[in-house]
Image: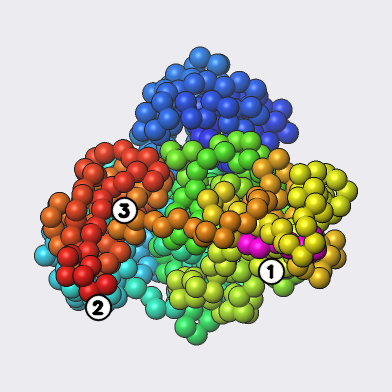
Amino acid sequence: MIAKLLIANRGEIACRIIRTARAMGVATVAVYSDADAKALHVRQADEAVHIGPSPAAESYLVGGKIIAAARQTGADAIHPGYGFLSENADFAQDVIDAGLVWVGPKPVSIRAMGLKDAAKQRMIAAGVPVTPGYLGADQSVERLQAEAAAIGYPVLIKAVAGGGGKGMRKVDGAAEFAAMLESCRRESKASFGNDEVLLEKWITSPRHIEVQVFGDAHGNVVHLFERDCSLQRRHQKVIEEAPAPGMDDATRKAICAAAVRAAKAVDYEGAGTIEFIADASEGLRADRIFFMEMNTRLQVEHPVTEEITGVDLVEWQLRVASGEPLPLKQEELSINGWAIEARLYAEDPAKGFLPSTGRLEYLDLRGNGRIETGVVQGDLISPFYDPMIAKLVVHSEDRDSAIAALQRLTGRVKCWPVKCNAGFLTLLLRDSDFASGAMDTGLIAEKLDDFIPQGEPSERVLQSAGHMVMDEIMDGSVEWLRAAIFDTPRGASTNLGFRLNREPEPTRFVLTDGKSSFPVSYRNLLADESLYVEGTEHGYLVSEDGVTWMLTLHRVDASGGVAAGDGDILAPMPGKVIAVDVAEGDTVTAGQRLLVLEAMKMEHALTAPFDGVVAELSASEGAQVQVEALLARIEQDVVEKADC
């Protein structure tokens, strides 16, 4: 058995691996960048080694530094987690050549499945059904456009070296093909160092079904059943569950057998996932489920498989890497109940899911469920890495009760001042199409407005906060307020208001004449588990259905808010300017793209708010900018101003 394990990763997955390693008596070594010097995975590991600056390209993606850290600490094995170097065959080979145990598949298997076009050819030879498309070596724009036309729109452009939803674009017609191809290639080159693509027929009612497989060095390969990962936004999984709703025994047997054939075709060892796309227009049918790709690593969503099978997949990884056979045979594996996982991200759904960074001054993830996280209250969400806060996982006897349990868990999340998507998740879990299992990968995009929480606290949230203020006034906890109200001349008013999330102007009226404006006691409201109010040093932390606000009490100033420069184009987050499409003096139209900002592995296009002229342009391609930095200013022309 491995004695000391170095984890070549960070955050939630590093903490997850540490937990199992400790339970098995395996010592652990963490690695960290400048940004992660005080991170949770560093605090939890037995040892930790600094490997470089904050950008991943200078730390977590430098294989030589990882191997050097293993040698420095006497580690005898390296676990790559997922992302970063986990599917890098050259790094895996370097680990093996250094005399260390690689906790993962053989490099030759990674290479066989690493490029989607070659993988599909291999699957065809193995008798695994694949999606119709183009896998050719000719990567010219002209050839790709011709093949797309032959396949028939809509088509999907996919990076051959892609993964995690990166380097994928749906194209609805020939007019937009070239622009989509360029964007896909740019993203793929930045993420994977390879800009080659393949084309697939876009399936109009797609379900994303994947099968967990596991192999050992003794020729054994088993499956641990399927997961449904159809709830996605921009090809990124949001909610995953196991088993897949609507999957009958015959279809399950067929798809799982195909997954085992796929793994055996590349002599697979360790944990892997065979991903399929299903045409669900007539339900799940074996003859309408096609191979997409193989992920030659542990998946983010592996906990749902663990919950329904009772298997610790990380333990299996360590045992198989140590040369042991698989702990269980296929006939010893079975499905028990239902499990669902939601990915909690530091992002703001109300602002197009822009990543949110900063210190987690308040973070409460308590509830009945499995919480996989790499941060706790007080930690920082860095702009350098994936913005995941946690994975929230529940297991129950059936799907309906699992959905209800996960709704309660997401609805209780409290996170501030960093924004998170808990409210979005809560609304999504209440959706009738999801509840019935009548969903596909387009559900979120089609009904997105239904899942965006309202931007301001509801009346009952304000009522509960207002009553807490009244209680504090009456018991003397806020002496200056008590004096202000009760020393007011008879007939005069003392108006108090709340500032929302540190905004400069008052946004909500609370009290007048020393009497509460609200007839409902906040104590009664708090009997509803979806509502929460707490007095803090910053103000009143209030949350409802997973959305958190901070209300600061002050006297209401009737002068109103401060006007903003509507034509100012500000950076919504720290990031890098990767494209500038205009110059000073250019005439622009409302909605026209001005520039593209890259942050936290995503591209964000900034557009003109109205027709006008680029009066000022501060942004330049390649520049690093801070949040709210002025990038450009658009002015309406003189005629428009005069007409106004």
Residue, disc 3: 569
Q: Which mark is residue 152?
A: 2
Front residue of 318/386: it is 386
- Prevalent SS, magenta region: strand
Residues in magenta? 508-516
The residue lying at 46 percent from left, 63 percent from top is 233
Indicate the colouring scheme. Answer: rainbow
Number of numbered discs visible in the structure rendering: 3
Mark 1, secondary structure of its residue: helix
Which of the 4 quarters of the picture holds residue 5? top right
**Which is nearer the N-term, disc 2 or disc 3?**
2
**Which is nearer the N-term, disc 2 or disc 1?**
2
Q: Residue farthest to the right?
A: 475
Which of the 4 quarters of the picture holds residue 522? bottom right
Indicate the position of residue 413 as horizontal and vertical percent values.
68, 54
* Residue 513 forms part of the magenta stretch: yes
